[in-house]
Structures are given as structure tokens and as C-alpha cells.
Image (cartoon, rainbow, N blue to C red):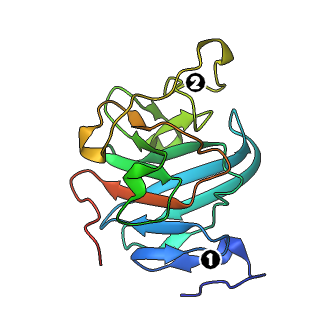
Amino acid sequence: MGVSGPGGDPKRESRKKAEDVDTTGLKWVIGPHVRVDIIGYSGTDVTGARFPVSIHASGHRKGVMDGGRLQSLMFGGQLGSRLILCASDDEEKWQLSPWRCIRLLAGNVLVGEGQIQFVRVPDLEWLDKYDQKRANQDTSVSPPFAATLADGQGWTFGRPGPLKNAVKMVRVEHEDRPYTGG
């Protein structure tokens, strides 16, 4: 299993379980037995440069995402999977900075090719419906506030604040099997 270094092929970057940092400096925290696909975009409305990342049940990650350019995304996987984008990479205090949790919940997902269940997030800082292709500029509101991950409700929530072009840590886990460290 190879981890490409600076100047390496980002499509071939792979990583083992738990915590790691990719070649763009983005910290990844991956829970046990989670299988998801994330496609990040450098523009809003899922446009611009693409950053595809696959996380396999073994904990291996293939691909890199540039958190300094991330503005929108699509997230797919098994129901109960969650993706948490954090403006801090501090494992203990990340919930004190802006963050957003995106959950795959029954009734709040689209079903794509191969029966994969996914949601779209056309703008990391604003609340749109899970199936919206473009951010609705006329009704821009922040996702519901949650002081902690445990306080959150619905398919998306978090601590409002700047996340576009400012993601420093990505946490991926299943709600039934959250990451507990080490």
C-alpha cells in the first residue's frame, strides 16, 4: 500500500485505518467498517475541480481532497454513514470551531447508479435540501446549530462559520460505529 508523497499521484494515494494526513495537509479520521464515496468540488453548486475520495470498509482511503479549495460536495454510502467537515484539525477541540455534519438518513437521500444512496451539498456554509443541485441564494440560511455532534438532528447540522476553502479535518464514520480514537 503506497502513500504518495509531495508530487506523487493523488489518485493512487491510499491510507490505512484511523487518522492520517493526505498530501494536501487535510487530516482524515476514519471510523471502523465504513464504506463511503465523497466527491468534493472547488466551486459551489458541485462545479469546478473534482476531488474524488473512496473510503473502504478496511479503513483504506483512495484519493485526496483539497480542504483549502473545497466549496461543495456529494457524499454517498450506506444509511447511517456520516461525514463531518471541520475548520479545526484539533482532535479534542474541533467542535468549538465551525463544523458541519452530513448524514445519510432514510427519506433524505437520492439513489444513484448501483443503488448507492447519496446527498448533494451545493454550498458548505448554507443549508439546501439534500437533493438540490444548486445553492438557493434567495433562501440562504445556515444549517441547524448543534453545540456537539450528539446534539445534532436531521440530515445536516453543525456550528456555523467559514468552511468553504477552510476544511482542515474530515471525519468519516457510521453512527453505529463512531471513531473512538487510536
Number of other residues with Cα within 10 Å of mark 1, as a class: few under 14, some 14 to 19, many 20 or more: many
Badge 2 marks a residue whose secondary structure is loop
Q: Is residue 27 above or below residue 115?
A: below
x 47%, y 39%: residue:
118
Q: How many tags in the picture?
A: 2
The quadrant in which residue 16 appears is bottom left
- Give the side of residue 101 with respect to residue 79, left or right: right
Q: Is residue 66 or residue 34 the one in the foreground? A: 66
Q: Amino acid at mark 1?
A: Glu
- In the rendered image, residue 105, in percent from the top left (x then y), is placed at 33, 35
Asked whether the viewer can see residue 56, the reply is no
Q: Which residue is mark 2?
A: 132
- In the rendered image, residue 92, in percent from the top left (x then y), is placed at 34, 65
The quadrant in which residue 178 appears is bottom left
- Give the side of residue 83 with respect to residue 136, left or right: left
The disc label shown at residue 28, or none: none
Quarter of the picture holding the C terminus: bottom left
Asked whether the viewer can see residue 26, the reply is yes
- In the rendered image, residue 75, in percent from the top left (x then y), is placed at 51, 45
Q: Is residue 145 above or below residue 91?
A: above
Q: Amino acid at mark 2?
A: Gln
Number of other residues with Cα within 10 Å of mark 2, as a class: few under 14, some 14 to 19, many 20 or more: few
- In the rendered image, residue 114, in percent from the top left (x then y), is placed at 48, 45
Q: Which residue is mark 1?
A: 13
The quadrant in which residue 47 appears is top right
Mark closer to the chain start, 1 or 2? 1
- Give the side of residue 40 with respect to residue 15, left or right: right
Badge 1 marks a residue whose secondary structure is loop
Q: Is residue 58 above or below residue 51?
A: below
